[in-house]
Amino acid sequence: MILPPLKGRFAPSPSGPLHFGSLVCALASYADIKSKRGKWLVRIEDIDPPREVKGASRQILLQLESHGLGWDESVVYQSNRLSLYSEIINDLQNKGAIYFCDCNRARLRELNGVYDKFCKTRQLISKGNATRIIIDSNSDQIGFNDAIFGWQEQNLTTNVGDFIIRRRDGLISYQLAVTVDDNAQGITDILRGSDLLGSTHRQIFLQRMLGFPQPNYTHLPIATSKNNLKLSKQNLASELPAGRESENLWLALKWLKQNPPQDLKVLSAEKIVGWAVENWNPTTIPPKTIQRAPEGFYETHCKQSKD
Ligand code: GLU
């Protein structure tokens, strides 16, 4: 029997250039899948125009290339796939798996993030309303084994309730788009930041609903700045310094507890990435949700720090 190829992916949202946190995710997912002789894909998650920064997609791809992280198939842009997401939503509607919801923000705030099915029997139309997927109590307990964090279980009814798969403004939710695309691209191994650990149960729920296979999951600690906040444009993450690719990669490997030898630092980005693939060992990465990025990868001034 010929098995389909293993595939991993890096799926950045183009909300800014790569920073240290995104580099560790890209490098780790690359090293992980290549160490298993799999393919590495890049998907630009550009379906949230308000969060998009002009030119960021192109810059991210250039930064990946300059860090020796080349992808194996054409880059996929989610913005080109809106008709596929709509088809899937239509199928779900035909199965009676969704309903439309006009609850306002104030009402949702009172529910503390767990939707109470208020609109389920109201027969609202799709136009101008959010689309929610129905979680029933026969399929609401979801568990999976994370390669770093171990067994992760969540009850969707008590944790999130019927969640949104298309917003009232028509934007497709991250949960739906990521589930559809990981399946369409044949992704077998997902490696990403621990901020998405709690989203994984919703994605597995959707996979089961849509008859998709479940990929393997590995979640990494997220790299934080001094105030213990995820590195991001808003939280003073610095853009990866250009011209210092080898050092960036070496520091990323050190942060990932891969124990890179000191003399690796002076080699080319390609050689360092090659070393990472040869020596990849995810068991050394601690199951911590956050871990401070090295100094120099975030601004230390202007914002209050907790320590
Ligand atoms: N696009 C998401 C982000 O940039 C990552 C999605 C994923 O890896 O599932 O945070």
Image: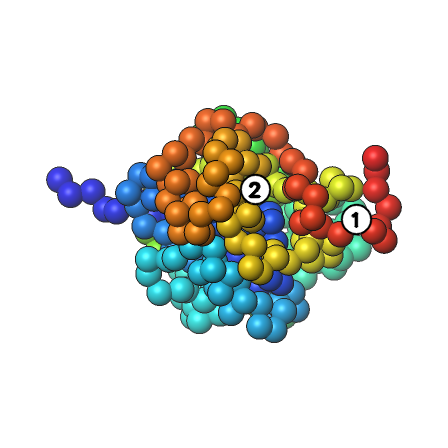
Kind of residue indicated by mark 2: Leu
Amino acid type at mark 1: Thr
Upstream in sequence: badge 1 or badge 2: 2
User: 238 or 100: which is nearer to us?
Assistant: 238
Q: Residue at x 69, y 53 (%)?
A: 237
156 and 27: which is toward the camera: 27
Q: Mark 2 and mark 1 in contact (Cβ < 8 Å)?
A: no
The picture quadrant where one finds residue 102 is bottom right
> What's the CA distance linking mark 1 and mark 2?
18 Å
Which residue sits at x=15%, y=43%? 2
Pointer 1 residue: 300
Residue 242 rendering spot, x and y as whole percentages:
58, 60
Above or below for 220 versus 76 = above
Whether residue 215 is visible here, answered yes or no, is no
Q: Is residue 57 left or right of residue 229?
A: left
Q: Taking 74 as reference, is 148 above or below it?
A: above
Locate residue 32, reporting x and y percent: 40, 40
Residue 65 visible, this orientation:
yes
Above or below 273: residue 43: below
Query: Which label number is shown at residue 60?
Result: none
**In this rendering, would 87 be left or right of 225?**
left
Of circles 1 and 2, the one toward us is: 2
- Circle 2 sits on which residue? 251
Q: Residue at x 54, y 67 (%)?
A: 59
Picture quarter with the N terminus: top left
